[in-house]
Every structure is written in C-alpha cells, then in structure tokens.
Amino acid sequence: MVGTGYVGLVSGACFADFGHEVWCVDINAERIDQLERGEIPFYEPGLSALVSRNHASGRLHFTTDLAAGVAPADVVMIAVQTPPMENGEADLRFVMQVARDVGELLLPNQYKVVCTKSTVPVGTAREVKKILTEAAPEGAAYDVASNPEFLREGSSIEDFMRPDRVVIGTETPRAAELMQSLYRPVYLLHTPIVTTDLESSELIKYAANAYLAVKISYINEMSDLCEKLGAQVDVVARAMGLDGRIGPKFLHAGLGFGGSCLPKDTKAIVQMGEQVGVPMRLIRGAIEINDGRATGAIQKLEALLGSLEGKRIALLGLAFKPNTDDVREAPALRLVPMLRERGATVVACDPEATETFRQFFPDLEIASDPYAAAEGADGLLLVTEWNPYRELDLARLQDALNEAVFVDCRNVYSPKRMRELGFRYDSFGR
Ligand code: UGA
C-alpha cells in the first residue's frame, strides 16, 4: 500500500485485519515513525486499535523503503494524494511518480497487479500502465487494476468491512481473480463484487460521489422552496425517502456538502465532461447550489439579529461533518470570514477539529464547549451535528447567551420547541 494517508492507512489496516500481509509504504519518514509508535496522524474512530492489533500480530508493516514493500507483494496499491489543481483537475504527479518507481521494481516471473486506489480521473489506470511499460524491465509480469474505495470519513472501518459493493476494474481474468481474492472475507458476507473494465471502474467512483452531491443539493434547493411555500423539508424528505426508488439517505437539508471528496470529485467530473464535450449540467447545478449554502445561513442570522457589526457569534462545530477532525471544504471555513467581513467576532468549539481548523485561522477564539462558546455571544450557529450538540442543555445555553438567537444549520432541533423555550430560532426549510 503506497501512501499512508486516509485511504491508504484505513485500507492497509483493514486488509491486514482480513488476514493479508500488508506493507504500508510512505516517503514521509516522520509519518512512518509515528505509525511504528502506534500514533495515528488523524482522527478516525476505531483506527488506532485496528492498526495496533495488526501491527502487533506482524501482518501490518510500515516502511519508507518502496522496494521492501513491493518485493514480496502480489498486489501493489497506489493510494497517494491527488490534490485538485486550480482548474479542478486532479493533480496526478504523485500517482505517476509512484507508478514509475514501482515499474522499475517489477521483475519477470514475479507477477504483480499494480492497482490505483486513490480517486483518479478516467484514463489514469491506462496511463499508469503506459508508465509501467516504460519503466519495467524487459519481460516483467504485471497487470494494472482500478479498485476505488467508498469509505466515509468517521465510519471508514465499518464501510471497509461491510461494503455495499466492491468495484474492481481489470483487463485480464488473472488480475480480476487476484484482486477478488483480496476481498474474500466480504465475499463470504455476500457483498456484490462488480468486476469491469478500467474506465468503468474509475468512473463509478465519480458517478457515485457526484450523485450523492446532487441528492444533497436537490434537497437543499427543495428546502429553499419549502420556506417560500410554507412546507416542511424534513417531512418532504422523509416521505420522498420512503419511496424505495429514492431511498432515505443523503436527503438531509442544511449547510450542504463539504469534505475532501464530494467538492473535489464534483469539480473533477465536470472537468472530465468538459474535456469531451459533455456539459454535466446537473452536477454543475449541484455545485452552484452548494456554494450558496453558507450565505443562506448568514442571511438567516441577520434576519434574526439585524446587523452583525460588533456582534459576537458562536459556532458549534468546525469539522465538515461529525466524527472527524477534517475541515477540508468545511462550511465553517466559509462562515468565519463571512461573519468577520460583517464586523462580527467569532468564537467556536468542536470536539476534535479545533487544531486542524486553527491552521486556517490561527487567531480564532476557541471555547472548550458549547456553553463556554455561548457565554456572552449574541447569536449561535449549529454548524456540525456532533452527538453532544444534538442533546444540548438548552436552558443553560440560553442563560449563557447574550441574545437567544439560534440558527440550526443542520435541522437538529424542533422549531416549535425552540420558540416555546424563547429562542429566536431558524433552520433550513422548516
Ligand atoms: C464521501 C462518500 O460518502 C464516500 O462513499 C466516498 O468514499 C468518500 O466521499 C470518498 O470519495 O472518499 P465523505 O466525504 O467522508 O464520504 O462524507 P459523506 O458522509 O459522504 O458526507 C459528505 C458531506 O455531505 C458532509 O459535509 C455532510 O455533512 C454532507 N451531507 C451528507 C449533507 O449535507 N446532507 C446529507 O443528507 C448527507
């Protein structure tokens, strides 16, 4: 497993737990030292125990030496980062560099599958193959494969162990069989394994993430309509979701999608479409709707509080969603500058993400918990629906607040109850 970022480390630890022997390789020596000591570089529930257990059992190794990892491997997975460039395209330099380095290590009579695990644009596996062909010695035995992951941050181990499906793209039956054998434990759970060509496999990942994004933006635009027409978006969503063809998931209205995947993958698929003359109108619409969500939240706050000049505003939650310390493309990253531009001071809290958030706003005032954040604040925005923020002591919160203004950006609380308690309260589409 080349790359010990989120995808590489979770996948590596889970494959080891399946009983495979896994070498996690990274050029970052500090990261490898950390992992050797049992320290996990990011917050993910259950990962620390999983890594320790498999490291102790001798199935999970960490090294900076690519050759040491590649030599004994049947499958080499490329799980390095693919950061977005200015124009939305994925930057594949790291993937291609690894491919070149791995290619030089391939040998005749030692068949290996070289597989992309990072989310990569359609055509990348074929590009990797070209590079391997250039770099590998004469007669080296290998195939390429694509094996996208569908892990959600915060529940990635469960997603890996009990996936809805596994997708494998290959060009030869031999590669397909070897790749399938990696997933034997989930096969026993009757998990569908979709084996296909390289291009379809690569596109499936983007198509799935973009669809989830469209679904979220759909319900968010519906929530705007609900507000104008006097309907309740949560009830609309529930009734829609009871239709088996629609399904209940990802119909939660609010601040929209953030994170390292949905925003990046929607932009990348639009880019891919543009390159071949397919305009991807639906996905572009989803991005546009999503971009307006933070502004919508600020407008709600202003409607309740008037001008924000000189006001103190508390944000509950900084992570892009609960159970992660990841703040990439988090709505809070947009909200803080918007509030400051309007002359407000911001205080925030989050159970896990304050350190990661501080990298973007080193001067942000951080409170230890929601009540400390609310102390003397003129208004509060519930930004990330962490469990502890779903069961707030509302009387205590009200006491702490200077003005009982509450914008519930995740539709957690009952509007009726909040108003009965004396809050000036708003949420999305209700
Ligand atoms: C997403 C996909 O769900 C995974 O299947 C995929 O493997 C992953 O991207 C990836 O490409 O690696 P993730 O980014 O961890 O996973 O987060 P999600 O749970 O999908 O949530 C994305 C965003 O949508 C969050 O900001 C969340 O708050 C928001 N969301 C989700 C809503 O606003 N409403 C909903 O109903 C659901």
Image (tube, rainbow, N blue to C red):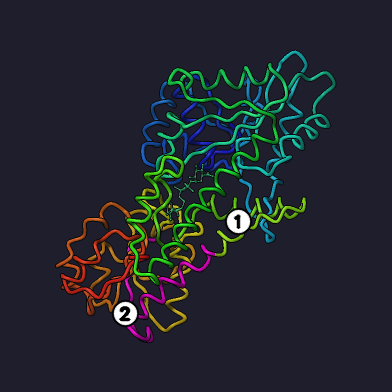
Residue 53 locus on image (x, y percent): 38, 27
Element under label 2? helix
Q: Is residue 154 covered in magenta?
A: no
- Report the front residue among 193 and 398: 193
Q: Is residue 428 left or right of residue 377?
A: right
Gap in Å between the C-alphas at discs 1 and 2?
A: 33 Å
Identify which amino acid the numbered label 2 is placed on. Answer: Leu
Residue 112 locus on image (x, y percent): 68, 21
Q: Quadrant of residue 170?
A: top right
- Residue 113: mark in rendering: none
Q: Is residue 234 left or right of residue 31?
A: left
- Residue drawn at (38%, 59%), measured in percent from left and top? 354
- Report the front residue among 364 and 400: 400
Element under label 1? helix
Label 2: how many Cα within 10 Å (few below 14, some 14–19, many 20+): some
Q: Which residue is mark 1?
A: 282
Q: Which residue is mark 2?
A: 304
Q: Is residue 178 left or right of residue 238?
A: right
Which callout, 1 or 2, points at the residue further toward the start of the chain? 1
- Tell me if residue 261 comes above or below residue 33 in the rendering: below
Identify which amino acid the numbered label 1 is placed on. Answer: Leu
The magenta region covers: 289-318
